[in-house]
Image: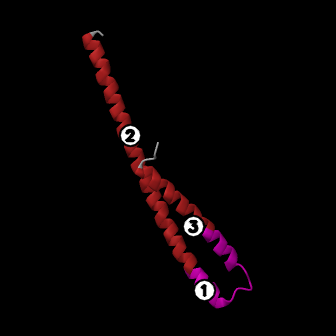
Amino acid sequence: MKPCPLQKEIQTTSDTIASLRERVKRMERNLNDPSLPEERRREMALELKEISKLLETNEEQLKKMHKENSKSFAVAACLFFICFLVYGLYVLVNGV
């Protein structure tokens, strides 16, 4: 069974966030290297800042997708309850 598109997007975004976090960790380790030239250090610091912004954006997007996914589940649960209620009333009225 294939996952629905929203679940696929959630998984893709989660994977992206994990890879960005790993990249941030590596860059922070490299920035702590005393033999790193100053110019390269500045470039890496700027890149680290950009990656952090991207990471923050992806985390916000993931929160929104999780919220949307829970809404979809709530709708499905309500439909299930309504169907069960209608069936129960049908059995009650018709005495089946």
Q: Residue at x 30, y 14 (%)?
A: 91
Checking the image for residue 42, the label placed there is 1
Mark 2 vs mark 3, CA separation in Å = 32 Å
Give the image location of residue 75, x and y in percent: 35, 39
Residue bearing mark 3: 20
Looking at the picture, which amino acid does disc 3 mark?
Leu
Task: Residue 88: name its quadrant.
Answer: top left
Q: Quarter of the image containing the C terminus? A: top left
Give the image location of residue 80, x and y in percent: 36, 31
Mark 2 vs mark 1, CA separation in Å = 48 Å
Q: Residues within 10 Å of mark 3 (few under 14, many from 20)?
A: some
Q: Secondary structure at mark 1?
A: helix
Residue bearing mark 2: 74
Q: Residue at x 40, y 41 (%)?
A: 73
Q: Residue at x 38, y 35 (%)?
A: 77
- List the single residue furthest toward the left: 93
Q: Earlier in the sequence, mark 3 or mark 1?
A: 3
Q: Is residue 54 above or below residue 4?
A: below
Mark 3 vs mark 1, CA separation in Å = 19 Å
Looking at the picture, which amino acid does disc 2 mark?
Ala
- Horizontal side, residue 83 vs residue 12: left or right: left
Looking at the picture, which amino acid does disc 1 mark?
Arg
Q: Secondary structure at mark 3?
A: helix
Q: Secondary structure at mark 2?
A: helix
Q: Residue at x 66, y 72 (%)?
A: 26
Is residue 53 rendered magenta in the image?
no
Front disc: 2 or 3: 3
What span is in magenta?
23-46
The kind of secondary structure the magenta stretch mainly shows is helix
Checking the image for residue 54, the label placed there is none
Is residue 40 rendered magenta in the image?
yes
